[in-house]
Image (cartoon, rainbow, N blue to C red):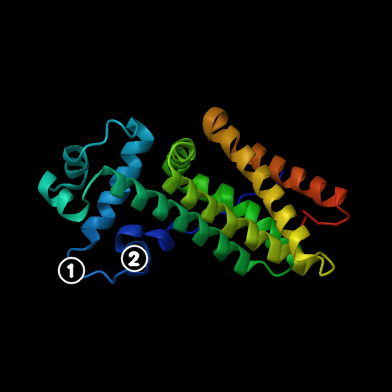
């Protein structure tokens, strides 16, 4: 069985991260601005456990320890909160994956790190997985959400494509991107099955299946990927 790396959560103390705040809201935080990020974190927790429809500014204020007016000062409406939550979830997953890829020493290990990153993210932030599932549903009905979803997916597939070309320089950009998307679909299918039916007790099983299915896909396309990296 493959082992999911335990990501150091002290690197993801989101409420205290100026870098996360500036990337999420496009400005550097001043005194008191961390309240905005705490609202987003509270929203993720509430959406994961109570659903989107039951989220109110009163509830978010209660979770953060501020009044409804203070929540409204930071966000005009519930849609703005939801979009900020999705962006934070994407950034968190990307940061974990990139950190693991940077630690990997070979092209084989780097591809494995992408798969590891998805499951390390879900293990560390299970509420994020539930909200991402909600976001995927809403993206089928909202063009703005769909655009954001496509951008996040394309970034992940492009990252895999670059790693695949490191593993096999003879791959064309088009072929590598296609394989990157196919591996991404494998990871997504195992993550969705895990979130909806079998989390957390089957985390390791779905991580292993994602690796095995990806290996079989690459082998079918003439690429040897050593999973025992």
Position of 6 with respect to 45 (left or right) is: right
Residue sitting at 71 percent across and 40 percent down? 209
1 or 2: tag closer to the N-terminus: 2
In the picture as drawn, the residue positioned furthest to the front comes out as 143
Q: CA distance from mark 1 to mark 2?
A: 13 Å
Q: Residues within 10 Å of mark 1 (few under 14, many from 20)?
A: few
Residue sitting at 66 percent across and 44 percent down? 185
* Residue bearing mark 1: 31
Residue 227: give x, y in percent of width and height: 77, 53
Residue 97: give x, y in percent of width and height: 56, 59
Displayed quadrant of residue 99: bottom right
| SS under mark 2 | loop
Q: Which mark is residue 17?
A: 2
In the picture as drawn, the residue positioned furthest to the right comes out as 222
Residue sitting at 51 percent across and 45 percent down? 123
Residue 60: give x, y in percent of width and height: 22, 42
Number of marks in picture: 2
Position of 93 with respect to 35 (left or right) is: right
Position of 163 with respect to 131 (left or right) is: right
Residue sitting at 26 percent across and 43 percent down? 78
Q: Are marks 1 and 2 in contact (CB under 8 Å)?
A: no
| Viewer-nearest residue: 150 or 72 | 150
Q: Is residue 191 visible?
A: yes
């Amino acid at each position: 069985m493959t082992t999911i790396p335990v990501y150091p959560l002290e690197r993801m103390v989101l409420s205290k991260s100026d870098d996360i705040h500036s990337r999420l809201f496009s400005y550097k935080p001043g005194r008191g601005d961390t309240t905005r990020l705490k609202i987003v974190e509270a929203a993720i927790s509430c959406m994961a456990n109570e659903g989107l429809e039951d989220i109110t500014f009163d509830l978010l204020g209660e979770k953060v320890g501020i009044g409804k007016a203070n929540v409204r000062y930071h966000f005009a409406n519930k849609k703005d909160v939801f979009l900020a939550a999705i962006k934070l979830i994407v950034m968190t997953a990307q940061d974990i994956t990139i950190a693991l890829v940077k630690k990997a020493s070979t092209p084989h290990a780097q591809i494995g790190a992408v798969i590891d990153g998805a499951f390390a993210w879900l293990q560390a932030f299970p509420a994020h997985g539930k909200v991402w599932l909600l976001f995927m549903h809403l993206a089928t009905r909202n063009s703005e959400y769909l655009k954001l979803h496509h951008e996040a997916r394309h970034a992940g597939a492009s990252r895999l494509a670059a790693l695949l070309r490191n593993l096999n320089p003879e791959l064309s950009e088009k072929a590598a991107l296609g394989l990157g998307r196919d591996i991404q679909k494998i990871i997504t299918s195992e993550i969705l099955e895990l979130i909806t039916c079998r989390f957390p007790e089957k985390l390791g099983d779905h991580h292993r299946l994602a690796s095995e299915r990806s290996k079989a896909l690459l082998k079918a396309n003439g690429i040897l990927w050593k999973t025992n990296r």
